[in-house]
Amino acid sequence: MLNEILNHTHPILVHFPIVLITVGLLYDLIVSIRHRALPLRQGIWIWLAAVLSAWLSVATGPEEDARGNTSFLEIHSTLADITAWVVSILVAARLFMIFRGKKSLFKFSLIVYLAIAIASCALVLGTGYYGGKMVYDNGIGVKANGTPVNPPKGNHD
C-alpha cells in the first residue's frame, strides 16, 4: 500500500496548490474589498502552504510516464514551473514587506499584488487543465488491471 501511495505522489499533491492558490486569492480579494486594504499577516499561511505544495508538485511530476505520449507535457511542465516561481515571488515579497514592518497594502501596491495573485491563480488552473488533458485525453499515468494504458515510448534521456 505504501508503494502504491508513493507511486501516486504527484496526482495526490497536485490538488493542493490548485486549491490553496485559489483560496488564497479569494481570501485576499474578500479581505481587500471589505477593508480597502490587505493586512499582510492575514492569510499568509495559506500562501506559504501554496508555495510549498506548488514546489512539491513540480518535484514529483513523473515526466518519464509522459515522454513521447502527449503533446501537452511541455506546456504543462512550463506552466507548473512558472506557477511555482510566481507564487514564490509573491510570498517572498509579502514576507519581505512584513519583515520590513509594513502592515498592509493599499491602492497601487494592493492592485499590483492582486494582479500577480490573479495571474498565479490563472497559471495554476492552466497547469491543471493541461495535466488533466494528459490524463483524460492521453491516458498518461492511467493503468487498467496493472498495465499502463499509454506506456512511455522509447528512451528519451
Image: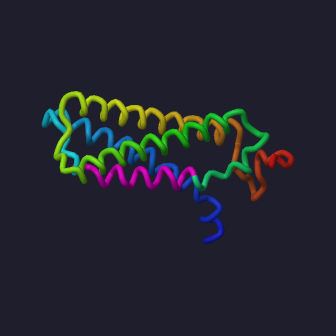
Q: Residue 148: image x %, image y %?
A: 76, 52
Residue 58 vertical position relative to residue 76 in the rendered view, above or below:
below
Q: Is residue 122 left or right of residue 97?
A: right
Q: What residue is at 59 percent from the left and 38 percent from the top?
A: 78
Q: What residue is at 38 percent from the left and 48 percent from the top?
A: 20
Residue 70 vertical position relative to residue 98 in the rendered view, above or below:
above
In this view, the residue in front, 27 or 83, is 83
Q: Which region shows up in magenta?
A: 42-58
Q: Residue 97: image x %, image y %?
A: 26, 46
Q: What residue is at 25 percent from the left and 32 percent from the top?
A: 109
Q: Is residue 52 magenta?
A: yes
If the image is split into quadrants, where does the N terminus sit? bottom right
Q: Which residue reaches farthest front? A: 100
Q: Is residue 28 magenta?
A: no
Q: Is residue 46 left or right of residue 12?
A: left
Q: Which residue reaches farthest right? A: 154
In this view, the residue in front, 55 or 61, is 55
